[in-house]
Amino acid sequence: MNFEIFKKNKIKTLFLFPMVLTMMGNEKSCEQQPVSQKRQLKRIVEIQKIVSPSVNFGPAGTFDFEFVANQQLIGVLQNSGDFAFRLMPPVQSNPTPARFALNGPGDFPESKILNLVGSDKTLMKSWLAGPSEKPAVLATQSTEAWCMVNKPQAVISGSVNSFELLGGGGLSLGFSPAGAHAVSVDMLKVGFEFFQLDLSLNATSPAPLYMNLASSNVTSKQTKTRLGAGLNLGGITVGPSVYFQTPLAKVTKAALTKAVNDLRAKFKSDDWFTRVLANKDADLMIVGGANVNLKVGDELAIYNELYTWSGEPCDSTLEYDGIAKYPVAKGFVNTVGRDVSFLTLTYEEEERVQIGATVRLVRLVEDIPLAKSASAAPAK
């Protein structure tokens, strides 16, 4: 696999900085709060655009429904609470090991290659400056699997299969799988009574495998909605700002919400994973922090992977990627940043943890017996 994979589709791939961190109140206020749902770790995903034909409204203009659908999808995914987005991948270019030697307290060249926010850079610098029997190994220094660090857990894409306004006498406007409906001037003077659309969402593993992880489809039958007093397009120039003020926007959002919920339900609860970004003795830095809902004390397991490349690692085709059956290490989260976290290992095989190794959840801190978590989980 080549890093160019992560630089393609500049207008197709959309990332959002996550909105995170609600601070806990005191013990008394927590006791007064209702029992909430069990905490879920958010999957880091890449969003590719929903594909949709434009809608021909005749004199009212051609409407770019694809733009509207993508705008709404981002909000729906974010509100679902199950997905995390990032503006850029953690490693921005192919590493050159000779460029990365810490020459002094003020020298922090990794910050120029790693896409980290200021607070995470500060945490990382402090972590690197700490005592260590072995030199730290970062994704910026690993030629074997640095590109794996940049892989999202899933790539989400979709398509709008039909968009139809229905009026009396069998009148219809928009498009279906069979193609676009014919438009006449008189048709736009009619009040349309119903709106329906059909859309699909897919979650696939990232390149080069592109394996289907989950799919959902919301049909026209499920979305058909009466438009109350009707919708008359005569004299209206249809654009995004106008569309969001119509009942159609609510139907579209409801359909996307259902599709996203269906997609979430088809992911297994233990499917969450992330990647190792750096390794230093009994400490690891991993991708994902508050943005994926990690907390201090969460117990994680690390699995090395076996790669076969057609040429240079991360600069050729990945022909084989096999994950180890058993973890090479386990540990507890001791510090949570915005987009990264730090682990203290409590168990490690002789084989050292690889950069890009898969990190999976063992237990949330709230699921660990209190006595054990108090003694085993390091303080932040």
Image (cartoon, rainbow, N blue to C red):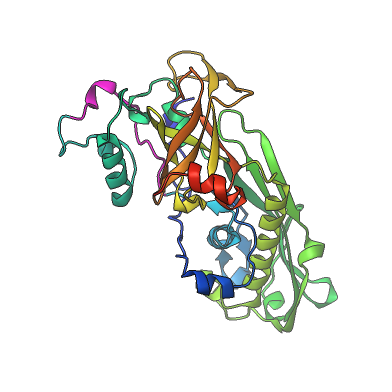
User: Measured along the vertical axis of the image, is residue 298 above or below residue 2?
Assistant: below
Residue 5 seen in this snapshot: no
| Residue 205, position as x, y percentages in the image | 61, 36
Residue 4 among those drawn in magenta: no
Report the residue at 58% width, 53% height from top. 366
Q: Nearer the viewer, residue 126 or 288?
A: 126
Q: Residue furthest top?
A: 311
User: Is residue 200 shown left or right of residue 288?
Assistant: right
Residue 208 horizontal side relative to residue 380, left or right: right
Where does residue 41 sit, x and y in percent of width and height?
57, 50
Q: Is residue 188 left or right of residue 295?
A: right
x, y (%) of residue 231? Answer: 68, 80
Q: Say which quarter of the image contains residue 155.
A: top right
Magenta: main secondary structure: loop
Foreground pick, 37 / 223: 37
Q: Is residue 346 above or below residue 19?
A: above
Q: Relative to the observer, which residue lies in front, 232 or 4?
A: 4
Taking the magenta stretch, the answer to whether it contains residue 89 is yes
Above or below, 20 against 114 in this view is below
Find the residue positioned furthest to the right: 169
The magenta region covers: 87-102
Q: In this view of the protein, can residue 1 be seen by the observer? A: yes
